[in-house]
Image (spheres, rainbow, N blue to C red):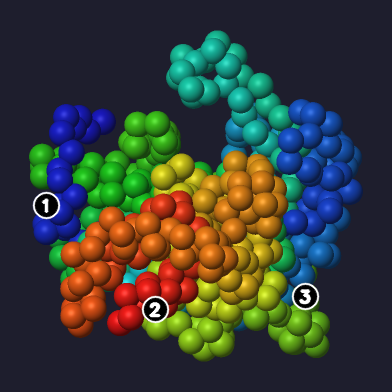
Amino acid sequence: MSKVVDLVDYDEAIASYDPVLGIEVHVELGTRTKMFCPAEGSFGARPNSETTPVSLGLPGSLPVVNAQAVEYAIKIGLALNCTIAETCRFARKNYFYPDVPKNYQISQYDEPIAFDGYLDVELEDGTIFRVDIERAHMEEDAGKNTHVGGDGGRIHGATYSLVDYNRAGIPLVEIVTRPIEGAGARAPEVARAYVQTLRDIFRALEVSEAKMEQGNVRADINLSLRPTPQSPLGVRSETKNVNSFRSIERAVRYEVSRQAAILDAGEKVIQETRHWHEDTGETSSGRPKSDAEDYRYFPEPDLAPVSPSRQWVEQIRESLPELPAARRRRLQTDWGYSDPEMRDVINAGALDLIESTVAAGTTPAAARKWWMGELARLAKEQDLALGDLAISPQQVVELQELIDAGKINDKLARQVIAGVLSGEGGPAAVVAARGLEVVSDDSLLLRVIDETLAAQPDIVEKIRGGNMGPIGAIIGAVMKATKGQADAGRARQLVMERVNA
């Protein structure tokens, strides 16, 4: 085992080595029942309450393929520009682990349902990076181990382990890339953007809820280093089951630094699986990585080959919804956003929110102003995702309508937002309860203006003399006196009239 005390700085590692990625993404399909039996598989159900003899691997039980899972797999393959196999078959992947009740997993090996595809991924600065897809194949999920008594649920130091087989048999599609070369220092960003793009596609296709926090989407990150892009591929590590975008990026950076330290020390990287630890931002050794032959694949004798007709495949192709990349291009054109504006919207996770806000009745400019301005600031301040703020697109529309009607201004709107977020009701209710409506009564404004002008006669003389610069101080004083509720435009007009300017 290699002993490494210090990590190499990431930038130094990238200067010395070329990183090569390989990413395996598992997505749980949102079918009502499991891949090979009628058991349901809902998240959070009582442990071991959603099983059948098939999902438990009991003797004499026979699997039956879930037709909807096959359809979903074809949808994913088509969305990833894959060729859909005219015939494919399942295989037994043999390995012995407590969460695999049959001691083998029904998967696909040399005959996947989809192969030879690609996905164009847009990075934060608008760069398009193409990731080649080797295959997308169907399989069943394993159960879930829970280790009790150890540190943070890890097996090390645990006193005993529990197994929940509810997840065993849930239909999966595993998407395997070819080696991802040429990313260089941007390898962590490429990995993150690739998985995020896949997640968006799964949701657009409506084949999965794709909630990473629930394990609907999990990524295994393979990484190796080599001296130059022309060198043979290095020995890879595989960091298993990384289930957040931020963790994917961090795991790649950590492995680059860790492997660089090993190579700099003149030692060899071990081909192994590794576990990601969110709390420490580190990976730890799991087990030696098995090669395909170690699993002793052979065709599943209890299942016939799957042979989707070309007519069915084309029907599925025609039914595909607008995919995320095409949707973004359409919305950008419809909204008139510049490239940097649209990238900012996407990177902030505001696209769906702005689309819903525009659909609810406001302009693209107004929707962007609020979601990318005050609301984004508050979300960051509270360490929340933008969509987790307690304000709806319809309420943002109502807020803008109050502004358009002259009842509040932008400054007052920020107070209205604070009231909405604190649970005081919708924008109109907050305005009424807090008394935030703009003061447009000329008599009240004139009284405040007269008091302000009387207190600053020198400024009045400057304005009368044609120096309009100081008028801002008068308007500011009026706004302060009315707690920001004066109509600034009307106040300026009245000031000009009062000083005969």
Q: How many marks?
A: 3
Which dot marks residue 205? Answer: none
- Quarter of image, res 475: bottom left
Question: Residue 391: x, y in percent?
Answer: 62, 53
Q: Which element carries disc 2, helix, strand or loop?
A: helix
- Quarter of image, res 282: top left
Q: In the displayed structure, does residue 185 sit left or right of residue 338?
A: left
- Quarter of image, res 493: bottom left
For label 2, the crowd category at 10 Å Cα-Cα, with few meaning under 14, some 14 to 19 and many 20 or more, is few
Name the N-terminal-most of marks 2 and 1.
Answer: 1
Identity of the residue drawn at 39% across and 62% down = 450
Disc nearest the viewer among 2 and 1: 2
Question: Residue 295: x, y in percent?
Answer: 55, 47
Q: Which element carries disc 3, helix, strand or loop?
A: loop
Q: Amino acid at mark 1?
A: Glu
The residue under label 3 is: 307
Disc nearest the viewer among 2 and 3: 2
The residue under label 2 is: 497
Looking at the image, which is closer to me, 147 or 335? Answer: 335
Q: CA distance from mark 1 to mark 3?
A: 51 Å
Question: Quick check: 238 above or below 2?
Answer: below
Q: Does residue 185 appear in the picture of this structure?
A: yes
Q: CA distance from mark 2 to mark 1?
A: 67 Å
Looking at the image, which is closer to me, 347 or 51? Answer: 347
Contact flag, marks 2 and 3 (Cβ < 8 Å)? no
Q: Which element carries disc 1, helix, strand or loop?
A: helix
Name the N-terminal-most of marks 2 and 3.
Answer: 3
Quadrant of the frame with the C terminus: bottom left
The residue under label 1 is: 12
Identity of the residue drawn at 57% across and 21% down = 147
Q: Amino acid at mark 3?
A: Ser
